[in-house]
Image (cartoon, rainbow, N blue to C red):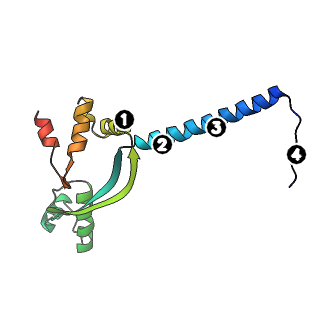
Amino acid sequence: MNYRIEAATKEEWAERALSGEKKLAILENSIKETHDNDMTKDYVVVTTISSFRHRYVIHKDDLRKMNGNVEPSDAELGEWAMDTVTCEECDEFSQEHMGEMPLDTYECSEDEMLTLFDRDNDYLKGWERDQKIKWVRDTVKNGEVVEVISNELEK
């Protein structure tokens, strides 16, 4: 092994040592902040998409009435029916919830959760901080989801 010996004054060595200690302190603080931030990530946010199957039923005579003086083919009636649904010109016949699909999850702090709460539930923005936290904490109890919002809105 070859060692290189540098000539330096006492002041230079002291400055290097102090610089090393500063770097170490910065690193230790960074690790502590990372640890502290991990400790404050008390909430998990799950984003999902909920899917429904909707059905619409329209009598062919009603479609013909909507398009007065044209005699459509069955294929055209099918197109007209889709247009009628797309334009929201008829009510749904039935619907069935097909389930939810999780898209992502992430952790957040209480302050981040409260910011999200106010953004996503602007009609509840006037609630006190503790009331919002209680609502979030009360939505899951013993593994069962409970209906809390209706109780809170009645207050």
How packed is label 2: few (under 14 Cα within 10 Å), some, or many (20 or more)?
few
If the image is split into quadrants, where does the N terminus sit?
Answer: bottom right
How packed is label 1: few (under 14 Cα within 10 Å), some, or many (20 or more)?
few
Q: CA distance from mark 2 to mark 3?
A: 16 Å
**Comparing labels 4 and 3, the label whose residue is closer to the camera:** 4
Q: Which residue is mark 4?
A: 4
Circle count: 4
Q: Which residue is mark 2?
A: 35
Q: Amino acid at mark 2?
A: His
Toward the viewer: 137 or 88? 137
40, above or below 100, in the image: above
Toward the viewer: 136 or 67? 136
Left or right, 38 with respect to 102, comes to right
| Residue 111: image tag | 1
Say which quarter of the image contains residue 50.
bottom left
Say which quarter of the image contains residue 80.
bottom left
Disc with the residue nearer the chain's start (2 vs 4): 4
**Comparing labels 1 and 2, the label whose residue is closer to the camera:** 2
Left or right, 44 with respect to 61, comes to right
Tell which residue pokes out farthest to the top in this image: 11
On the image, the x and y values in percent for residue 64 come to 17, 64
Do the residues under discs 4 and 3 have CB atoms within 8 angstroms?
A: no
Q: Residue at x 17, y 56 (%)?
A: 90
132, above or below 138, in the image: above
Q: Residue at x 16, y 50 (%)?
A: 146
Disc with the residue nearer the chain's start (1 vs 2): 2
Q: CA distance from mark 4 to mark 3?
A: 24 Å
Q: Tag 4's secondary structure? A: loop
Q: Residue at x 14, y 36 (%)?
A: 153
